[in-house]
Amino acid sequence: MENSMTSKSQSKAREHMKELERLQEKDPEFYQFLKDHDKELLEFNDEDIDEDDEIDMEDDDIDMENAEIPEDDEADASDLERVANKAENEDKSSKNVITTEMVDSWCNSIRENAKLGAIRSLMRAFRTACHYGDDEQDESSSKFNIMSSGVFNKIMLFVLSEMDGILRSLLKLPTSGGKKETINNLMGTKQWKDHNHLVKSYLGNALHILNQMTDMEMISFTLRRLRYSSIFLTAFPSLLRRYIKVALHFWGTGGGALPVVSFLFIRDLCIRLGSDCLDECFKGIYRAYVLNCQFVNAVKLQHIQFLGNCVIELLGVDLPIAYQHAFVFIRQLGMILREALNMRTKEAFRKVYEWKFINCLELWTGAVCAYGSEADFRPLAYPLTQIISGVARLVPTARYFPLRLRCARMLNRIAASTGTFIPVSLLLLDMLEMKELNKPPTGGAGKAVDLRSVLKVSKPTLKTRAFQEACVFSVVEELAEHLAQWSYSVAFLELSFIPAVRLRSFCKATKIERFRREMRQLIHNIQASSEFTNERRMRISFLPNDPAATTFLEDEKKSGASPLSQYVATLHQRAQQRNESLMGSSVLVGSRSSIFGNKMSEHDEEDDTVNEDGAAVFNSSWFPGSDSKYGH
């Protein structure tokens, strides 16, 4: 009996020694760690085991033969067993704790020798860091545990800063850039089969931590670093869709520099991956824009303008595909307007006369103005113009003056960008002839009205002096803008005749002297521009339908030499001063009301982020799953 137990102990000892040898070959870094911290375990030999086993077996023979254990001793034995198990678990968990020395050792091994074992150990630690605090995480089955914020920050900073270069080196790719074809060609190689699990682990765990983060600066830094590795998402379509969804969320709701960083990430995906993500990005960013432009005030105006500029910029990545999406979305707006014209109900009107609908018109107006010269986008100008004109005339009452002015401004922009004549003057002159602007105000001076942030005004506001002045001055500005565009046309005399006649009628009808002065000044500039054009028209010999008519006064138009153009420049200065008095220059952006624009920090504006910026971001005690004072 004694000999058999001894042989079993010896066989176990030999197995244990073989396991230690395999560990040294498979994971030399971990073996070195055990050698530094638990030397006795590695110096284990079978002679010690044999001696201990012989002594234990002799004691067991003496104590256990024909012996009975009292009840109290049984209780003590169970307590001792629990204490022993607890101590064993604590000892096991302490061995799994990641220390700063371990992280430094891995990082140095990667930097100096690019050891694959160190990379794998670091990626396991990165996964633990990203999933720290997860309810479903089983810590007993995890190889590593994170115990301090310093270790967490060190792991996150090194992995986010260096892992892209490490993966590119393992896969033998260029140090930066690349297209989806590069990854498609790589997926059949041995390097990809050996190391693709590291790529997926890096991108998947980084996405998980992005969903857990609440600090805007941490999210911005993480997205900036992940942008360099966006090309790898070609191989993982499910991860790609999730990244697009997360980035669009941050773009629409983030504060500080996060909207800019998120948009650059999305744009980089579209450029590098092309058709793999274009459709999803175009639909997603338009949907996110609509969700974030449903309410407008003086504070949110610039943020909505920024979102619209981002959408327009993204459409320029692939205009043929963008045209297909733009056509569908503009058609949806046209169907909503047609329903309102046919139904003639308040509910149908409300779907048109709401900020969501108007901001979508503003968005596509900006897109047509940006790409109107391109053959892919120019056909959209006509249906969009028809929709805007229909919206302006849907409910022709004075309470919707601000909305009609926005529509006139959009039509002027389309006409200027496409070089197409749009009869905007009729829409503006109809507004001047409404009775609310032709009689003295009975509601007092009233508060200043910002026509850019409202679509409809109340009945008491209609009777105030401030509202009348804002409307008349805005009509003059838009009418002068429209006429100035065509003040270099051969037909300007005929084109400006009817507007000049109706403006004189308004001067006679209105009883407000300051409005008369404003109209007389506009009429004077229209007449001066007519003389300016006629003087040069007398010298030409070609017919109006001659192609040479398109180059008439081309040089003067570039220099803005006509009296109307110079008058419009002064009106723009006056409008800018009026807008600045209504709203301060600092604009709040996002749900956190973080300052955006000219007050963005310098390091947020930089695209290439250095490690010092990351160290400044990852220097807190924040952990995944922990509470933070910041929120999305």
Image: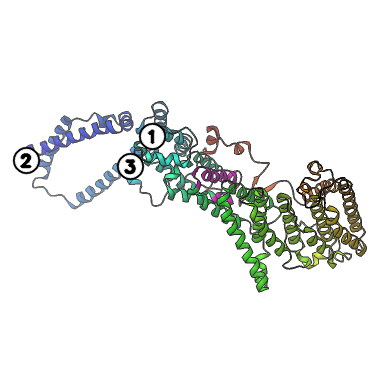
To which residue does mark 1 refer?
119
Q: What secondary structure do most residues of the magenta stretch adopt?
A: helix
Q: Residues within 10 Å of mark 3 (few under 14, many from 20)?
A: few
Which portion, as a residue range, is magenta?
A: 248-274
Q: Residue at x 33, y 46 (%)?
A: 140
Against 435, is 84 above or below?
Answer: above
Q: CA distance from mark 3 to mark 1?
A: 27 Å
- Name the quadrant containing residue 232: top left
Q: Quadrant of the N terminus?
A: top left
| Relative image position of residue 70 (x, y in whole percent) | 17, 51
- The three-letter amino acid code for the residue at tag 1 is Ile
Amino acid type, label 2: Met
Left or right of residue 628: residue 382: right
Identify the secondary structure beneath mark 2: loop
Q: Position of residue 288 (x, y in %)?
A: 57, 55
Tell which circle, 1 or 2, labels the residue nearer the N-terminal end: 2
- Observer-nearest of 428 and 417: 417
| Picture layout, residue 64 above or below residue 176 | below
| Residue under pointer 2 | 1
The amino acid type, in three-letter code, at marker 3 is: Glu
Which of pointers 3 and 2 lies earlier in the amino acid sequence? Answer: 2
Residue 610 visible in the shown view: yes
**Residue located 20% across and 49% down the image:** 73
Q: Is residue 266 magenta?
A: yes
x and y percent of residue 238 in the render? 43, 50
Position of 625 compared to 431: left or right? left
* Left or right: residue 410 compared with residue 134: right
How many other residues sit within 10 Å of disc 1, few (<14), some (14-19) or many (≥20)?
many
Image disc number at residue 90:
3
Element carrying mark 3: helix
Q: Quadrant of residue 338?
A: bottom right
